[in-house]
Amino acid sequence: MNRIARKHLLKPLAFFVAALALEGCISPYPDSVGRYTSPIGGAPVISNETPYSAALRCMAGFVRQRPVRIAVGQIADYTGKTESDGSGRKVTAGAALMEMSALNKAGVHMVERFDTSVAEMELKYANNKLIGDDQHPQPAPGDYRRILAGSIPGSDYYIVGGITELNFNIRSENASGNGGGTATNATTGTAGGSMYVMNVGLDLRLVNTNTLEVADVISYQKQIIGRQVSAGVFDFLGTNFFDVSVGESALEPIQLAVRSVIERATLEMITRIYRAPGACAIPLGTDADPLREAGEQPYYAPAAYAPQPYQQPYGPAPYQPAPYPAYAPIYSDAGRNQPYRSYVSAEPAGMLGLRGGL
């Protein structure tokens, strides 16, 4: 079989193989469980964590010692940025829900104020004597739920704020090149890559519910990085040519960055509410955490009791609780008095380099 015949034979064979591949993916008849095709993937469901989740859980030990009720109000998207195709906003509208999740990780006692529609409807039904008294073990006909004064606990503080910044391409770098032989049918190739940085900013307020005094204000921002890499080859093989290219791109999830900023702001906010040492920032896994206070020591849980050896003839030694490891409970404003302490000397406060502008 000559070369031309083989070429004409390979073309229909390739189409036949492609058709078989498609046939194996989708069927016009449902299978035994009622599906036309099997979905790809299969990754398991995992917990939605950030680098600050462990530190929030560390705070639970302090929170239990001083119960404070906190409510979450509106944390809206004030960036005004929307997708170019009109599919929606670029930043999540669920920042308030992320805040509730962060408070729950820290064991904070929350009261619902964000969506009270169901409770208000139940209250309306109860006021009209439409809800039965299911609290009684044997409710009599006509019993209804009573509305008792003071049955709803109030909040001590509430958190409100918004996502106030979303800056695209505050800095970018790219490089590309191509090369190959100089002959007409020589192999040539291209390669390139680019990196770009954006940021998201958040402003939160902690308000005293009784006095409406603003107890705390936090403003944080986080930078997000993305990259693109591509390569291609162009070559002639006889009377045919081939142009093959590959690429890869990745962007740190914007919504995960929003969750990270919220959790870090929550960590500092509840640290100040409960007058707890900032040592819970240490489980972040780095001593270079920009928001860690100077001189903080790790928080240690109480040491477990270890039975003492028997001392004849008096039996076991009396239990002596192990002392806590020494650490100084630090509560200071050093971090806020020096907000640029994490930046290098080449970027002093006030320079555009803080946002990647230089």
Image (tube, grey):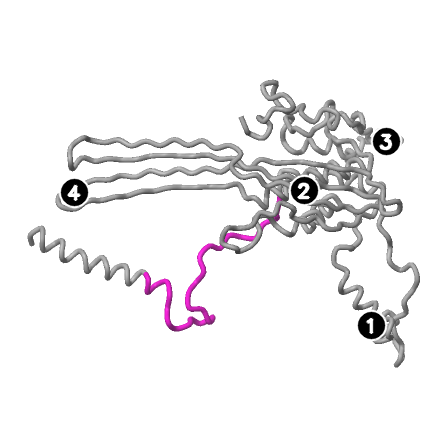
Rendered residue at 68%/51% (across/down) = 97
From the viewer's perspective, is residue 355 above or below residue 166? above
Amino acid type, label 1: Tyr
Q: Pointer 3: what residue?
A: 320
Mark number displayed over residue 262: 2
Q: Earlier in the sequence, mark 4 or mark 3?
A: 4
Inter-mark Cα distance, 2 to 4: 57 Å
Residue 237 got which mark?
A: 4
Whether 76 is drawn above or below 126: the answer is above
Residue stretch rendered in magenta on the structure: 22-49
Of tags 3 and 2, which is closer to the observer? 2
Mark 1 = which residue? 125
Please name the amino acid that badge 3 sits on: Gln
- The reply, left or right, for residue 326 in relation to residue 282 is right
Q: Quadrant of the N terminus?
A: bottom left
| Callout 4 crowding tier (Cα within 10 Å): few <14, some 14–19, many ≥20 | few
If you read the primary sequence from the N terminus, does the residue marked by circle 1 or circle 4 appear first?
Answer: 1
User: Rounded to the nearest whole Å, what is the CA distance between mark 4 and mark 3?
Assistant: 84 Å
